Image: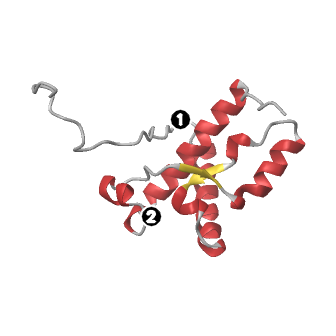
Amino acid sequence: MPKQDFSEYEKRVSADHERQCRTTLTIYSAWRVCPIRKCRRDKTCSGEMRVSAHQDRKIRAQREIGLSGNACAKLPRCMATASALAFETFAECLDDLQRDLIAHPHEDLPKFDRCLKGRQPRRDTANP
């Protein structure tokens, strides 16, 4: 079976989902207890996104309306492997953020790229 390509809508939903997840984890300082060293060092959620069984319900809901379900399948690694109780708390915080975004549509979330703080060589030096 050929792999389905994301539509433009699903790409936008996927990007928004990732931003909301990373913002939620950053706002509530989850990086302090995150098992990923990079997140603790950057003081923001910057770990990889992984497919998670926690999202099965959302994937089924998207498939029922004709989408692929790929847009919301991934979570940051710490939440993808978290216990059911920790994920439930995260989901409640994520719902709060989504309600705030609906109430204040002019607000914009930061873009979370994988930070490379302190990892790049100085620009005035030549490459060896």
Provide residue 38's location: percent of width, then percent of height.
Answer: 36, 55
Q: SS at mark 1?
A: loop
Provide residue 115's location: percent of width, then percent of height.
Answer: 35, 42
Q: Is residue 84 left or right of residue 56?
A: left
Residue in the image at 50% along x and 50% along y: 22
Residue type at the position of mark 1: His
In this view, 109 is above or below 52:
above
Q: Which numbered disc, 1 or 2, marks the residue that appears first in the sequence?
A: 2
The reply to whether callout 1 and callout 2 are in contact (CB within 8 Å) is no
Q: SS at mark 2?
A: helix
In this view, the residue in front, 101 or 81, is: 81
Q: Quadrant of residue 92?
A: bottom right
The residues tagged by marks 1 and 2 sit, at their Cα atoms, a distance apart of: 26 Å
Provide residue 79's location: percent of width, then percent of height.
Answer: 57, 61
Colour scheme of the picture? secondary structure
Q: Would you call the spot at circle 2 few (<14 residues within 10 Å), some (14-19), or many (20 or more)? A: many
Residue 106 - label: 1
Extreme-front residue of the structure: 128
Residue 4 - label: none
Q: Quadrant of residue 29?
A: bottom left
Q: Is residue 35 left or right of residue 126?
A: right
Residue in the image at 49% along x and 58% along y: 25
In this view, 35 is above or below 74:
below
The mark closer to the camera, 1 or 2, is 2
Residue type at the position of mark 2: Ala
Provide residue 91's location: percent of width, then percent of height.
Answer: 64, 62
Q: Would you call the spot at circle 1 few (<14 residues within 10 Å), some (14-19), or many (20 or more)? A: few
Residue in the image at 43% along x and 49% along y: 46
For mark 2, what is the residue?
Answer: 30
In this view, 21 is above or below 29:
above
In this view, the residue in front, 66 or 119, is: 119
